[in-house]
Amino acid sequence: MLAIESSCDETAAAVVESGRRVRASIVASQVDLHARYGGVVPEVASRQHLLKIRPVIEEALKRAGCTLDDIDAVAATRGPGLAGALLVGYNAGKAIAYGRNLPFLGVNHLEGHVYANWLIEGPEPRFPALCLVVSGGHTDLVLMRGHGQYERLGGTRDDAAGEAFDKVGRLLGLPFPGGPHVAKQAELGGPSALSLPRAWMHGTFDFSFSGLKTAVLHTVREGRFDTPTIAWEFQEAVVDVLAGKTSRLSRELGVAEVLVAGGVASNTRLREELRSRCPVPVRIPPPEYCTDNAAMIGAAAGFRLALGQRSPLDEDIFTTNDWDEASRFAPAAAAGV
C-alpha cells in the first residue's frame, strides 16, 4: 500500500504491508516555515505540499526498496483537514491509482490516527475498544466495535486539547508549536498555590478547554507565577480531565482496551495517567506515529482493502470532523472481520 497524508502542514508518504508492517515512512515537516507566523497558514501549507509531494513519494518508495510496479493499492487522506492541503495529497493519490489501474482508498484522517495502534508490534488491538483521539484539531472519545464501526460518545465543544496547548504556549511566549514546549516547561515546575479550573461537563463525556485557556491568560497577566509553574498546572488540568473521563467511560462500557491516538498522545504525563487510571490495557503508538504521518493512513486502508472496499475516483475531500463518514462502509461486512 502506498499511502499519502497532507491534511495540514506535513507532507507524508509511506509504504505499508497488510496494514501492519511499515516498509518506509517519510514526513516533510513545515514547522520551521510556519513558526514565523505563530501558526499554520493554509495557503502557505498548500503551496509547500505542491513542492514536496512528488519527492516525498519517491523517497518513500526508495526507502521501501520498491517501485510503483510493486504497489497493490494507493490510499490518501480524504479529510478532515485544510481543504487546499488535502486536495494536493488526495489528487496525487487518485492520479497514481488511475494511471496504474490500482485500487484507491480515501481514508478519514481521524480513523488513520486510531489505526496507528495497529503499527505496534505484537497482537492486534481487541474489540470493543475505546479510542481517545487527542490532537491539535480534535479531541474525541469514540467506541470502536470493529473495523469500520465507530460511535462518537464525546468530544470538545470548543478548543481541542492540542490547540489549547499551542495557544497556552503562545501566551507563555514559547516557540511554535507550543505543545511540546509547554510539556518541557512543565517538567521544570511542580505543585504550587496556583489552581487552574477543570471543565468536567458533568453528565456528558464532552470536553471544554476554552475556560482553562482564559484562566491561563489572566494568570499570565497577573504575573504572580513563573512559566514552569503555569505550564505544570495547565498540563495537569488537561491531563486530569482527559484521563479521568477516558478511564470512567472505559469502566462503564467494559471495553477490552483503550486506544490513544493523535499528536497529544506523545505527551508523557498523559501516557502515565491513562495507564495508571484505566482498568484495561492502554495502547499508545510510538511518538513518530502519534503526529501526522502516512503510515497510519496505510494501516487503516490496509484493513479496508481486506474488506473488499474501494473509493470512487470521483469522490471529493471533506473538511469536517465526521465519524459517521468513517463508518460509511458496510458495517455488516466489517462485523465479520
Image: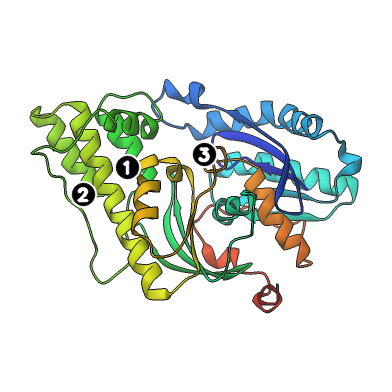
**Residue at the disc numbered 1:** 164
Decide which of tag 2 and tag 1 comes sooner along the chain: 1
Q: Amino acid at mark 1?
A: Ala
Compute the Cα span from label 3 to label 2: 28 Å
Percent position (x, y) of residue 328? 63, 69
Rendered position, 32 above or below 298: above
Q: Which mark is residue 211?
A: 2
**Residue plotted at (51% across, 35% down):** 42
Nearest-to-viewer mark from 3 and 2: 3
Relative placement, left or right, of 93 versus 100 is left
Percent position (x, y) of residue 105? 73, 55
Rendered position, 45 above or below 107: above
For label 3, the crowd category at 10 Å Cα-Cα, with few meaning under 14, some 14 to 19 and many 20 or more, is: some
**Residue plotted at (35% across, 28% down):** 181
Residue 309 visible from this viewpoint: no
Q: Secondary structure at mark 3?
A: helix
The residue most toward the bottom is 332
Relative placement, left or right, of 101 versus 315 is right
**Residue plotted at (31% across, 36% down):** 167
Decide which of tag 3 and tag 2 comes sooner along the chain: 2
**Residue plotted at (37% across, 35% down):** 179
Compute the Cα span from label 2 to label 1: 10 Å
Percent position (x, y) of residue 250? 40, 68
**Residue at the disc numbered 3:** 287
Q: Which mark is residue 295?
A: none
